[in-house]
Image (cartoon, grey):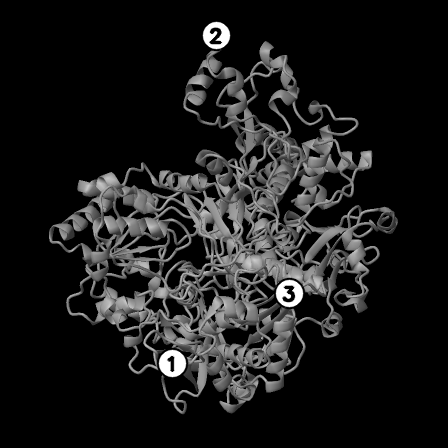
Amino acid sequence: MEKKSSTKGQSAGSGFLFFIAGFVIASVFGWVIFPKILYSVNQQPIKFSHALEDHAELECENCHFFRDDGTYSGIPKLETCTECHEEVQGENPEEKKFVEQYVQKNKEVPWLRYQWQPDNVYFSHAAHLKVEKPLPCTTCHRDVKKEKIPPPVRINRLTGYHYSTMKMYVCEDCHAHKGANNACNVCHK
Amino acid sequence: MKINRRAFLQFTAGAIGGTLLSPLPWKLADDTAIWSQNWSWRPKSQPGETTWDYSICRFCPGGCGIKVRLIDAKRAVSITGNPNSPLSMGGLCPLGRSGLQFQYSPARVPAPLKQTSRRGDIRGLKPISWDEAIGEIVKTLKKLDNESETNAVAWITGDTSGSMVQFIDYFLLNYGSPNHFHMPSAVDNQKLVNMAMQGFNQPLGFDIERAKLILNFGASLLEGWGSPVRNQKTFIKAVQDGRTEYIHFDWRESITSSRATQWIPVKPGTQAALALGLCHVIVKEGLYNREFVEANCFGFEDWEDKEGNKHRGFKANVLKEYSPSKVAGLTGVPAEKIAQLARKFSKEGPSLAIWGTGSQNNPANFYEEMAFISLNALLGNINKPGGVINQPPVPLKPFEEALTEGTHRKELEELRIGRDTLEEFPFPGNAIYAALEEIAGSEHSQVKLLFLYEANPAYCLAEPKAYSEAISKIDTVVSFSSFLDESSINADLILPNHTPLERWDDFITPATSPFAFYGISKPVLNPVKKTRHTGDVLIRIAKALGGEIVKNFPWSDYQAVLKWRLEGIAEASEGRALEGEDVSRVMLTHARLEPNFKTADELWKKLTSGAFWVKLPDTTSETKFKTPSGKLELYVQKLKRDKFKKWNDRLFVANFYPLEPSGKKDKFPYLLIPYEIMQLTSCRVANPPFMTKLLDDTLLKRKELFVHVNPATAREARLSEGARVTVETPVGKGIVKVHLSEQVAPGVIAMARGLGHSAFDEYIKGKGVNANKLTEVQLDPVTGIGTWWATRAKLTKL
Amino acid sequence: MSKKEHEKSSVRYGMVIDLDKCTGCMACAVACQEENNISFLKDDSIKTRSINWMRIYKLENGKKYPEHRHVILPRPCMHCDSPHHSPCTFVCPVNATQRDEETGIVNQVYPRCIGCRYCMAACPYYARNFNWWDPTWPKDMVEMLNPDVSTRMRGVVEKCTFCSHRLLKAKDKARVNGENPKGIEYTPACVEACPTGAIVFGNLHDPESEVAKLSKDKRAFRLLEKLKTEPKVYYLSSHEWVRKQGDNDLK
């Protein structure tokens, strides 16, 4: 009996240890290592800053504008940037790099996107901005005016989505609360 | 501590617990779901800025204006109609809409290719550089020149709608070869008949917009005749408004028949007899336009020539030979109906008779077209609103103006291949068949170097073996095709042209248009393959040849050629660049079109941004016919009398002289007649996947083509629906299936044209039978032009 | 809920196809394929396997030559307006197809579809297509895919959407130009393509619209009306034999 119980006690103690060990290792793997494996970390080709004085003075729509046909231009094309940066304007090494590597070679910058949506999604910027009460950009985007350098772009290796890509439930939720149409074809194409 | 089974299990339990409480499984499950919803290997189209650019469709001779949707000005994603076009008025046919499938076709020629093995071996075609390719041609041309054999060079052109055909002519003239041929077209014969009867060497226009009654002798208005979109629009608008009545005579219940106000079935190939039957009634009952006929027609009455010989005129001939009862026997249309139609036709006005077949690539028989022009002439329907129109010329600068030296064109004509054969005909025309025959029949071919421009004779010619037999005697065949078509695969050198969306080209008044038309088709995309504009290549070759020819080619590239030619219009200061005006309305209101340009540059700018130059015909003043009599000749004096073996007056007026298909009736009891539909192109390109998808499964199933046969005929031949048969004609045979169709006249085997390709891509290759291979070509006894309409055939069950 | 909204909405997009004006050129069907990135097969002659949103039927009067007549009938999705549900949306177990009650457009979300094909069985018009294979294009032709429509994948159902992506774009254009996007007029690709103007599209609930007027024309009929599916696609024909066939199964 005694032997038995002592075996039991010993096994309970060390068993608990094994259990904890397994739990901790799995937790560390699941919480810390797995995300590192899942997401690739990429840097923007140019460390563009929205917070720089000259940029911060601009309205968002100066560079991220609507075209006449109602479509949204999204990330600016080289054309928009060259309006100011035809030649190097200041001391910033990133600007110099930008002018030398892209402007002078007339090559589009391969910017990485934080809010990339798959091709079956139709997100209408007009529906959220060209309305009576426009949503602030920061409802969905980072407050970029505070960022000195762009954060690394963390892309999910499995899905191709960015770490912060908005999922459908967020859209649906807001639509439901605001009484907006939640039919599939409002956002899917 | 010992790791035993229990410890292991406990560790595992902990790990499972830890994993379940971490995001790993949930995130992984979610991401897997997302991954599965996006299928990463599925092609995705990158969004971008949409822009539109203008050009002209070049996939048929119709000349429709197009608008191309571009993404980031880099790639094209759709083609729609340009509403400014006076021909297509914003519409576009399925072929034009499929244009991008040619632009991005897997059958495109990626770079200049040279055959390194035997002809026809597609793997033997190896890429070479442009310099090598051009160098090789220059070398051969120089060699032939040194040997004084410049007429050993021949050229076949398929796209005759723009200046390129004249530019090639000009190149050959400078080099010293008269041997420029073009692919058969309905225009070939029409131009000749028009020349003979009215003295104008050009195709006819038809003012279908303003006619009140249209008698249609077989023209497939809704299946490719003329400018298909213009026909569609006009036809439907007119029928809907009750403005125009369309009466259609055909052997097949085509969509044109079905849509017409009235469809009257006629025996295949007898439409000309019917027209003459109408003439008979119109003349007999005195319903014709006396004023016009007396003042403007020659040979209506009997006449006497300078030598005092009496000749029988049109009137006597038609009264004697084409009584309604006789015509009823020929055509199957009841005699009373013929009389009734004739009265209706001459009473209501303006009435117009139109004619023709499929997509304009089959020249008609000489007398047939004479009959239809005569019928229109009886009503004075020439150059009148709602009538047959002589297209005003487009005053482009002629290439001859660029010549710095005098030429020897006349002498060159003497060297033309096929000339000996054609000399035997009273009024010779397009000599392609005569030339091919002569080459194939000679032991040592006169032609040593053959060029193909936008032409695919190995597939498109009726009786294509005429071509393959000829090239077996030719040392070098060079194709400028953008596609690996049947003819390119069998060429020795391919110098790929830009596609229509990548190149500068122009479009000059298409057949059947009643107004003069000129448009620029400009490149809307950058070339995606290693191709070059054939016009640019010719300029380079000319410069490389050296000598006097260099001076005659002052242009830097083909775009400069077009600009130079346009100066002619600016100098003439005629017509107007239409920018959105409705030309049919302009025509209906008889408004005048004042020029809206002063310089060639100004006009160029307009024409390259979606406008079209138009000049309306003069329908108010008297026409000055350029014939020996100065009148419209119902009795044609231009035919060379001595070329007829035995001549009589009947040979000079309109008559029903059908070309009898060869073969014995008892051996070949049926008539095989090819037909065309809008979803199956029979032009130089193969059907695109968009259109092949739309083909009915009673036309093509798996790899087999269905011929359409009337159920009564099938019963006679003991064939049931879907029966596999061999269809055999005196010139070829093929295996097809039978579909029973009440749309087809008894005794006819209706076979769609446009299948049976042995080249292009895997979406069309090897499907069905090429109707051209079964079609018999006959040389018209007057013009020597190769023509076809029906071939005797038999069906044998397999 | 759907019933209430159904009655409430002032917008019901619908289509009228005038068979008297149709010349059977099938430019509509080509435009549809181009606009909607519809894939094609090496052999598209087996019609149960071939994907086509705008299918073309031939109606015949059943008579012998030369009394025989035929008309061409283009058939998009009918976007059935029957109460609560269209036949297909009723059976979808995963809500991958659903009717937008604001516009009446029956939509299809490809990533959501599980490929059970209940909807195909439920649709009396054969308007739905199944992707038996992964859609593929020759390498160069990927360039011409329309960015406004996503490509599908193997194992999902697809069908005509009344070009609802064009509605989205039209709405955005209106918003940017300060106009009211609700019930805005837009043109599906097939309508734009028809050279003779045989296809008319618009808001059936707007009594002033051309579609609303034409749908009440005495030549108007719908396909299989007896099933009470309330199609929003109307046909016009002046031939009684054509109108009669509207209530039979198409062959």
Q: Amino acid at mark 3?
A: Lys
- Give the x, y percent position of residue B225: 51, 64
- Give the x, y percent position of residue A140: 69, 27
- Give the x, y percent position of residue B790: 43, 78
On screen, residue A25 versus residue B440, left or right, reads right
- Give the x, y percent position of residue B311: 39, 80
Q: Quadrant of residue B235?
A: bottom right
Question: Chain ID for label 2?
Answer: A
> Can you tell which mark lies on residue B212?
3
> Can you tell which mark lies on residue A91?
2
The answer to whether marks 1 and 2 sit on the same chain is no
* Residue pointed to by mark 1: B310
Question: Chain ID for label 1?
Answer: B
Q: Return the residue nearer the eye: B717 or A90.
A: B717
Q: Amino acid at mark 1?
A: Lys
What residue is shown at x 41% (from left), y 48% (from top)?
B499
Question: Chain ID for label 3?
Answer: B
On screen, residue B672 versus residue B308, left or right, reads right
Q: Amino acid at mark 2?
A: Glu
Quadrant (top left, top right, bottom left, bottom right) of the N terminus of chain B: top right
Q: Residues within 10 Å of mark 1 (few under 14, many from 20)?
A: few
Q: CA distance from mark 1 to mark 2?
A: 102 Å
The answer to whether marks 3 and 2 sit on the same chain is no
